[in-house]
Image (cartoon, grey):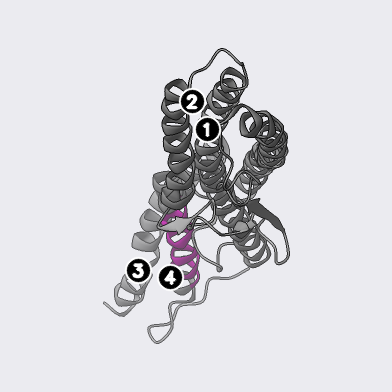
Amino acid sequence: MGMSFSVNNNASASNILSNLDYVQNQLQTSYQQLSSGNRINSAADDPAGYAISQQMTSQVNGLNQATQNAQNAVSLLQTASGAMNQVMNILQTMNTLAVEASNGTQTTTDLNNLQQEFTALGNQINNIGTQTQFNTMSLLGGSSTATVGGSFTFQVGSQEGQTLSLTINAVNLSALGISGTAISSQASAQAAIFAVQAAITRLSAYQANVGAVEDQLNYTISNLQNSAENLQNADSTITNTNMAQTYTNFSQQQVLNQVGIAMLSQAQQQPDAILKLLS
């Protein structure tokens, strides 16, 4: 094939320049992938992979927030459970006082002293029910006559409808069925034994309900964390840079870039040959 000499169009230089532009664009991509550690830095790098990655990122973010939601819910339930434990301790003491007052060896003064302590303990139960809060929300009723402590719905998944609901029973003398209970006489103390022990049984059921949901939340947290980790790993296989392969390509592109620059310099000298023909 004969060589074409022209001063208006240097086809060789144009072709080399086009190839050189492509190689330098590839170099810039490799620079970005190696420096960021991400194979996909924009939708242009891999449109399909970018779309999949964004969906996975959305899921991972949702799962991580759902995990935080569930952990907050556990904290709320632990607050309620701790308050119930205190009330249970008080009920156990009230039961002991009722049994003591039921004994015929107590004088009127003894019974009055026992009644004072019994009343003070009852007031403390109402105080706990009124004062127990989480993030300013009342957990155990908020008043001495409430029948429901609080109803809560926890978002424990990344999708709509993945919720867990719970109603916490009110904890006060009225809700526990011991409002007006007294131990100021042997007869009333006998009745108080039955009432307080029934309250202990009722509160135990409340605690079991809260504890069951707390256990469920703990299992939910473990599952959410596992799901988020697996999705994160899957996303990494799509978006992360294969460092060895990318660096190998980068080295090849550097060589091609240097050769291209050298060849462009040579191609740009071809018009000089025409001048020599004219001299």
Q: Quick one: SS at disc 3?
A: loop
Name the residue that disc number 2 marks: 111
* The disc label shown at residue 268, or none: 3
Earlier in the chain: of badge 2 and badge 4, it is 4
Q: Are marks 2 and 1 in contact (CB under 8 Å)?
A: yes
Q: Quick one: SS at disc 4?
A: helix
Up-down relation of residue 36 to residue 49 (above or below): above
Q: Is the magenta stretch mostly helix, strand or loop?
A: helix
Earlier in the chain: of badge 2 and badge 3, it is 2
Name the residue that disc number 4 marks: 13
Q: Quick one: SS at disc 1?
A: loop
Name the residue that disc number 1 marks: 184
Mark 1 residue crowding within 10 angstroms, few (<14) / some (14–19) / many (20+):
many
Between the C-alphas of marks 2 and 1, the distance is 5 Å
- The extreme front residue here reads 108
Q: Magenta stretch: residue 14 in it?
A: no
Earlier in the chain: of badge 3 and badge 4, it is 4
Task: Residue at 64%, 51% (x, y): give it.
Answer: 169
Q: Do the residues labelled 4 and 1 touch (CB within 8 Å)?
A: no
Task: Residue at 46%, 38% (x, y): give it.
Answer: 119
* Residue 59 placement: quadrant: bottom right
Task: Give the magenta-colored segment's residue range.
Answer: 15-30
Foreground mark, 4 or 1, reads 1
